[in-house]
Amino acid sequence: MAVIATGFFDGVHLGHRSVVGQLVSAARERGTDSVIVTFRPHPRAVLQQDAPQLRLLTSFSEKRELLLSLGVDRVEVIQFSREFAGLTAEQYIRDWLVGRFGCTAMVFGYDNRVGSDGADASAVRGIASRLGVELIPCTALGDISSTKIRSALSAGEVEAASAMLGYDYFLNGVVVSGNRIGRTLGFPTANMQLYEPLKLIPENGVYLVRVEFPTLAGESGLVPAFPVAPGITPVSCGVSGADRMNQGARVLYGMCNIGSRPTVNLGANITIETNIFGFDEDIYGLPLRISFMKRLRGETRFSSTAALRDQLAADRAACLSLLSQIAK
């Protein structure tokens, strides 16, 4: 038996968190599991022509971690395909939510739609009644959407995005070797390769960031807390809250540059480089998480490396000033 909410939940933002809170409370009241049923890949990637441009706020692993941290007992994922998209609301609820996941109650928003027939709350109420499923109305929390958050990040408005997310937007990746230009300028950087290639990268520029080295409790070394999710082979896979990773993290701060480094003419490829304050250790091949706190400026092409060095010093001073204000 399970109380279920279904959706893509990209970013697990404050609107999603309101739904999840109602889901967890309802499950506890009924003495059963709280379950999120989500999809992979994003439905737009299957159904719409703009799929190549789609960027995600969270990888599946990140989304799962966020949902489980909110008290959800299980996260189930369904392989989304054109065939699956053809299911009516009744087929989806009957064959999947009830038949496969044991749904006895369903949290459903007033403006939600489900199935190829676009069933709204009224239609779903009738379907649920016929199937013996309790329908729990879900109240919305403000005008928050994953689309609005993507737009804010694409404009470099990380503070606005974080306000809608309920946490600082972050990137997870592994530290890779770079050109060591930062070190020659006196600002060594950790270059990041993202675990999730479809992860949305904020607009080019320089940012104040929080830097974390995720670890697993009981492990002596640094290991990825958010590895790349494996290939999508099962139709569905359940993740129990009991299987969550017991995580710790070493936390520092730094300034992150996102862009093509126009001053040193190293090509058009976008890089993610972070100068970590008070830190200069060999961390190649280790996992790294950076969380965006504030955008300092846009990407600029300077007249010389000396001018770039002066600006980096000013950026660092600005970051340290902001951190001192936060600490007060």
Image (spheres, grey):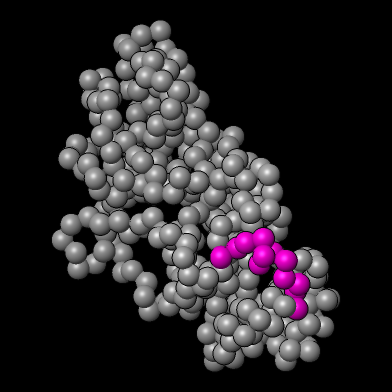
Q: In this rendering, would 302 be left or right of 52?
A: left
- State which quadrant residue 89 falls in: bottom right
Residue lying farthest top?
303
Please state which of residues 295 and 221 is positioned toward the viewer in this rendering: 221
Q: Which image quadrant: the N terminus? A: bottom right
Q: Residue 294 appears at what percent x and percent y?
A: 48, 38
Q: Residue 289 appears at what percent x and percent y?
A: 36, 48
Please state which of residues 240 and 16 is positioned toward the viewer in this rendering: 240
Asked if one can make out residue 27 in the rendered structure from this viewpoint, the answer is: no
Q: Residue 37 appears at what percent x and percent y?
A: 58, 72
Asked if one can make out residue 229 in the rendered structure from this viewpoint, the answer is: yes
> Which residues lie in the magenta part?
79-90
> Would you say residue 87 sits in the magenta stretch?
yes
Q: In the figure, 190 relative to 310: above or below?
A: below
Please state which of residues 157 and 43 is positioned toward the viewer in this rendering: 43
- State which quadrant residue 50 falls in: top right
**Image point 31% across, 69% down: which residue?**
246
Q: In this rendering, would 245 be left or right of 197?
A: left
- State which quadrant residue 133 falls in: bottom right
**Image point 49% across, 46% down: which residue?**
199
**Image point 22% across, 41% down: which residue?**
284
Q: In the figure, 285 relative to 139: above or below?
A: above
Q: Residue 5 appears at what percent x and percent y?
A: 62, 74
Tally the numbered discs.
Answer: 0
Q: In the figure, 35 relative to 118: above or below?
A: below
Q: In this rendering, would 308 be left or right of 16?
A: left
**Image point 56% across, 40% down: which residue?**
153
Q: In the figure, 98 relative to 295: above or below?
A: below
Q: In this rendering, would 277 be left or right of 93?
A: left
> Would you say residue 127 sits in the magenta stretch?
no
